[in-house]
Amino acid sequence: MHGPGDMAELGPTAGPVAPTAWGTATAGRASRSQHHPQGILGSAWLCLLLLLTACVPATGTNPGIKAQLTRKALEFGRRIGLELLQSLLQKEHELNLRGSYYSPLLGTLTYAVPRIRIHELQMNDSTVDFAEDVGVRLTVQRARIHLSADWGAQLGTIQDKGSVELRVHDLAVVAVLGVSVDGSGRPTVWSAGCDARGTDLHVEFHYGHSWLYNPLALLVQKALRQELNKQLCLELHKGVSRLEAALKDMKTSTQLDAFAAIDYSLVGQPAITAEHGDIALKGEFFRVGKSQQTPSSAVPAALPAALPTALPTAQEPMLLLAVTEFVANSAAFTYFTAGVLRKNISSDMLPRRFPLQLRTKSMGVFSPQLQQRYPDHPMELHLSARQQPLLSCHPDALHGAFFSSAEAFVVLPNATRVPAFLLNIDANVTGKPTITRNRLGGTVSLKELSVSQVTSHVGPVEVKRLETLLKFGLWLFGVPWANKRLQAGVPLPTLHGLSPLNARLSLQEGFVLIATDLQYKP
């Protein structure tokens, strides 16, 4: 796959070749730009393998997120890689190749090849498969390459210039990329094997004194073919080394806002079968700039060794993604300990038809002393989580438990806030996430609500009556308001041009399962 650059460098005589009747070749020094075809070809097919090396599955520690890439995903990556490769090759590439050839009959021939043009790269007969317990295997059969280059040459006092064509047919390459993980949770790769064979190579010069150079080309074609086979794998090894160096700098966490970041480091060693490659991420939220001890109860549930595939689908999906309830609970714990799960509600923030208005005239129904002491004053309600919200996933729905404190204040004309009473308000809700047209949405319903008095500065509060009216208000206004926004949904995320296609969602015990194909838009 790195052949065009190598072949251009080899023609006519770069690199060591066997002595012939015409003389012995001596390789010159070639300087290449970053767009040399060798680098382009190597990087292009290696980018396919990033589908697998993005993360690595767990074997000892339960992951927060687990996924499964299928052979269909590898085929998708192969097609995208070929399209990317073709677009990269449809232009001239700087080569700046210089060398010389010594012949006892003719003397020293010096040459220069400033640029190269690739006219055809046909690799339709290629496959990408999982190499069991190793990584990914690329197999190319009957590939064809056609390229041309301008050249200039000098033999003694004679200067000449023209072009050269190189065609390779029946090129076969088998390369295996090994995938693992290092101690910091980053993926590592290595070249686990390579074999390249090109059986049909033809070099032809045009213009200038091509009648003189073409007999020489015929004699060295066998040596060029042998050098090509060797250089292809050498260049692939170099490409893997460049990928390995880049992965060492890969981030394993991302800051989401001023309070939280998510750790998506890899957990454990690869577990690759002939049919699929499992993928696992830690998937844990943590405080920004703070050490955080996750509660002992907040441990990821053990995901099944084989993810369920019984989703309504006509074909095998490219990707199965399981997100455990641990991910959501670690986020809830992080934001709770950061103290940001709080909201102040003023009288002008509630709908006019809401049965409970934040004024002493309205709230005095539940606390007569409140209206007596502060007749018809505006009020504020300070809501905050008194413990971490909890989420659990079951086949019927997502279940959420919220534990809040609500402190009511009377707002005096001089803007002073006087505490009135403190309540505990707990709620149990259920929700059903949905994916529609690549947007994640859902619905929520209120199952239980309980209100209890903690303290009061205005006498007893009739909490049962308040609880009943609050339930009615949430049922009439709060839940429909939330569902209207949830049903609108948010777009599913994209990564480097990759986005889900025809995604489907299923609730399982302990995790949400998403089955999806992928699409690429550069």
Image (cartoon, rainbow, N blue to C red):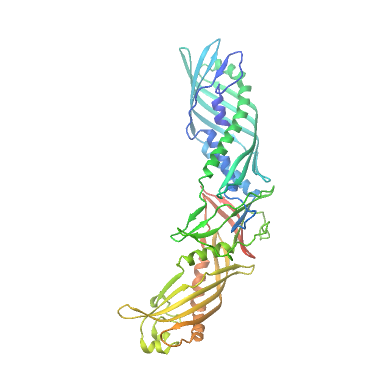
Q: Report if residue 47 is visible in the image.
A: yes
Q: Is residue 274 above or below residue 140?
A: below
Q: Position of residue 212 (x, y in %)?
A: 55, 15
**Residue placed at 35% from the left, 83% from the top?**
377
Q: Position of residue 455 (x, y in %)?
A: 45, 82
**Residue placed at 31% from the left, 80% from the top?**
413
Q: Report if residue 172 is visible in the image.
A: no
**Residue placed at 62% from the left, 46% from the top?**
74
Quarter assignment of residue 417:
bottom left
Q: Nearer the viewer, residue 390 or 15?
A: 390
Q: Is residue 246 above or below residue 402?
A: above
Q: Nearer the viewer, residue 479 or 210?
A: 479
How many marks overall?
0
Q: Position of residue 257 (x, y in %)?
A: 45, 59
- Looking at the image, residue 233 sits to the left or right of residue 340; the answer is right
Quarter holding the N terminus is: top right
Q: Is residue 65 above or below residue 274?
A: below
**Residue placed at 45% from the left, 74% from the top?**
383
Q: Nearer the viewer, residue 513 or 271?
A: 271
- Looking at the image, residue 236 sits to the left or right of residue 420; the answer is right
- Outermost residue, top direction? 105
Q: Position of residue 271 (x, y in %)?
A: 66, 50
Q: Is residue 11 above or below residue 485?
A: above
